[in-house]
């Protein structure tokens, strides 16, 4: 299972100039297998937008955007969505005031 977290609120990978942090989680036990930090520019075209872009971090980061506990919580939400819909889901979420809020979920075509 993949979990991604963009650098700034509202800046998903389609809208941001930076790749998001990426976390790989084992489905069976939601154990974190790999964490890749953001900060490298995305390859390809920039998305045109009238909205101002969030400021990009300067230089390499050493701190992850999600804690192990948050990754586990999101993996649990993802597993619950998959059980409910009967197939893998791509979900968009926000984290505010210590709570994850699900914005949308759709079937992941694999």
Image (cartoon, rainbow, N blue to C red):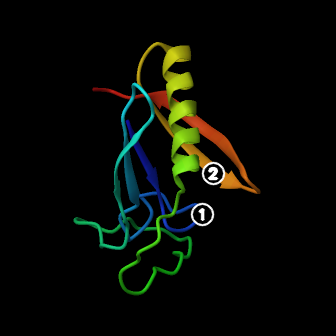
- Residue count near mark 2 (Cα–Cα under 10 Å), binned few <14, some 14–19, many ≥20: few
Residue drawn where x is 55% and y is 76% of the image: 52
The image shows residue 57 at horizontal and vertical percentages of: 46, 81
Residue drawn where x is 51% and y is 51% of the image: 68
Marks 1 and 2 in Cβ contact (< 8 Å): yes
Q: Nearer the viewer, residue 41 or 4?
A: 4
User: Is residue 83 left or right of 87 when viewed as pictured?
Assistant: right
Q: Which of 26 and 97 is in front in this view?
A: 26
Residue drawn where x is 41% and y is 68% of the image: 48
Disc on res. 9: 1
Q: Which of 76 and 101 is in front in this view?
A: 76
Q: In this view, does 13 lie above or below 73?
A: below
User: Is residue 76 left or right of 23 when viewed as pictured?
Assistant: right
Helix, strand or loop for disc 1: loop
The image shows residue 103 at horizontal and vertical percentages of: 63, 41
Disc on res. 94: 2
Specify the quadrant that holds the C terminus: top left
- Residue count near mark 1 (Cα–Cα under 10 Å), binned few <14, some 14–19, many ≥20: few
Q: Which of 4 and 44 is in front in this view?
A: 4
Helix, strand or loop for disc 2: strand
Specify the quadrant that holds the N terminus: top left
Q: Earlier in the sequence, mark 1 or mark 2?
A: 1
Q: Is residue 6 above or below residue 33?
A: below
Distance from disc 1 to disc 2, alpha carbons, whole Å, reads 8 Å
The image shows residue 31 at horizontal and vertical percentages of: 42, 38
């Amino acid at each position: 299972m993949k979990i991604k977290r963009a650098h700034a609120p509202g800046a998903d990978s389609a809208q941001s100039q930076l790749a998001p942090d990426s976390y790989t989680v084992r489905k069976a036990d939601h154990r974190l297998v790999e964490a890749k930090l953001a900060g490298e520019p995305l390859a390809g075209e920039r998305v045109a937008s009238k909205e101002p872009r969030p400021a990009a971090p300067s230089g390499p980061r050493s701190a992850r955007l999600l804690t192990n506990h948050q990754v586990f919580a999101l993996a649990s939400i993802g597993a619950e969505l998959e059980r409910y819909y009967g197939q893998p889901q791509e979900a968009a979420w926000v984290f505010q005031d210590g709570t994850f809020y699900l914005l949308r979920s759709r079937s992941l075509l694999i």
